[in-house]
Image (spheres, grey):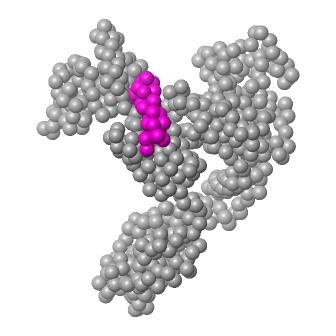
Amino acid sequence: MMKKMRQITKSVMWFVVIAFVGTIIFAWGMDLTGKSSGVKPDVIATVNDQDISIQGYNNLLETRYKEAEQSYGELTEEMVQSLRDQTFLELINQALLLAEVKKRKISVTDKEVFEFLRRNPPRELIQADFLQTNGQFDYGKYMQLLANPTLDWTPYENFVRSTIAQVKLQEMVVGMARVTPQDVKMNFLQSQTKLAAHFIMIGASEFENKIQVSQTDIKNYYELNKEKYQEEPRAALTYVLFPKSASAEDEEKIKNELLDLKKKIAEGTDFVEVAIDYSQDPGTSSKGGDLGWFAKGAMVKPFEEALLKLKPDQISEPVKTDFGWHLIKLHGTKKEKGETKFHASHILLRLKPSRESLAKIKAEAEEFASRSKKVGFEKLASQKQLTVVSTGLFKKNDFLKDFGSNSPAHRFAFEAKVGEVSTAMETPNGFAVCKLVDQKPAGLKSLDEMQNFLAKELNSKKALDLAFQKATQIYLSIKPGQSLSEVAKAHQLTVNHTGTFTAQDISVSGVGISPEFQGVAFALTKENQISKPVRGKFGVYIIELASKEAPSDSVFTAMQDSLTKDLLNERQAEIYNQWLSSLKRQAKIQDYRQQALREEENL
């Protein structure tokens, strides 16, 4: 069967081939045969000397971009940058997995491939008109297509073969995961048992001004805790940013587009239809631009000023706001509790720089980068009245304003030499030119560098010790049968209440994030039972159990199978992620994005 499916004829149905292209990332994403030797112009990364092509990255990025637009509408620059990073990481993971499949000699039979195709029709074909009967996907027609010897299924067959091999690999990796009935019961109780508590807190801040920290204290504390102050490599940049600003021509083009739409409506096309087809407001375009009823002051000032000039069923001239340019249609007004309300719709076209504008901005940034190497970075910035921004020292994974995470600026900062000026690099907000001003290698931070931090940390620690001493004295003063409110009254303290929480909640009302508090609270078994002092981050707690409600055994019995499955899936995911992280740590990964990424406007 598979040999027949691989027969190629001139009568290939190109629709089928094109439909599969969107899902096949393996052939595009990686050069599966060649080894890397130096940086190639068409390579975006290497994983253990295995090339990942720029074409593969760009094709997968375009697919992910379209998927995100369908889900979220207009994408912000931050979302686009995140998509780039996720797509790159996806291809790195694929390269690691395929190499592991090869290493373990995992094979996939033709029968397994055919069964997968039989059971999992591609989404593109499920939606194809020629496989529909009475508006529904016709599985019989799909099977006829699958058996057609004139069609070349090789690309999708290869994709399926790789997919099945990776599934087998995952099953090998997570095969040792186990959960016992006791594990399931404990997890169930932690998630379903509800507890409420009263507590008093002795805050460390009460003692911070009463403590003196000497230089000897700081030095001794530093020597005892050196392992805590090992630092990753750090770097510092200065940069100038050329913002992605729309030109006057871009503004005029948007206004003219809106005027054309207004003319189209005047000639008889329904406003709703035009809004659905053209509006770039993801929240209202599917509703024909309908904003519903809203009160005066609900909209930004330029929008409201234009709205107030309209009569019912009248459409405004193009109106500019911070969101873009609008056509506004007023449907009507009404009085409600003495307040005027409006019912309106709008068509929004977002103002974005055109490709031509972006090209000019990029060229300006590139010119600055080139000239700064001769004139001097700071001097040229001053001449051009550009603001020079400093990042301060940062680590490889730190978030940087204007750049995000894992950006070309990060890579430049840790690959360049101090004093070097970068090429123009695209950021979510514009094009930046960076200068590397400092690099610090990994190692122990010096005592001088840590001085202020250590003084504060030691002060907080000593203050917490004093808070614990006071809490211990209070705890030892508690008499049998005495309530926490009585204890608090005797010591002029306030009793706080948590509300209901579970052991798996991230934070507790009135306490915040404190695993120590939660652990001790759930160890209490009787109402009104009072705990020993519990150290938190900012103070010491004494806790009284107010209520504790455990779920019934019958509920557990009814849910046991699904709970077991969920916990097993959780354990398997944890094992798999740890294994994949280990693969990455051991791999030699070279990132060439800064040199290789094609421009965003080519998408």
**Taking 79 as reference, is 488 above or below it?**
below
Residue closer to the observer: 212 or 79 = 212
Q: Residue at x 66, y 64 (%)?
A: 183
Which corner quadrant of the image does residue 288 belong to?
top left
Answer left or right for 346 relative to 521. left
Extreme residue in the front direction = 374
Quarter holding the N terminus?
Answer: top right
Name the residue: 71% across, 60% down: 179
Question: Does the magenta segment cover residue 355?
Answer: yes
Magenta stretch, main secondary structure class: helix
The magenta region covers 351-376
Q: Is residue 510 magenta?
A: no
Residue at 41% across, 79% down: 459
In percent of width and height, residue 95 lies at: 72, 41
Residue 144 showing in the rendered view: no
Q: x and y percent of residue 243 in the render?
A: 39, 36
Viewport quadrant of the C terminus: top right
x and y percentages locating residue 307 in the rendered image? 21, 27
Quarter of the figure with residue 20 = top right
**Which residue corresponds to the image point at 33% horizontal and 29% vertical from the top-left?**
324
Give the camera-side residue of 182 and 295.
Answer: 295
Question: x and y percent of residue 581 in the render?
Answer: 67, 53
Q: Choose between 130 and 189: the one closer to the eye.
A: 130
Residue 314 in view: yes
561 relative to 8, above or below: below
Q: How many discs appear?
A: 0
Q: Nearer the viewer, residue 501 or 437?
A: 437
Q: Is residue 505 left or right of residue 166?
A: left
Q: Which residue is at the far left?
A: 338
Up-down relation of residue 307 to residue 261 (above or below) = below
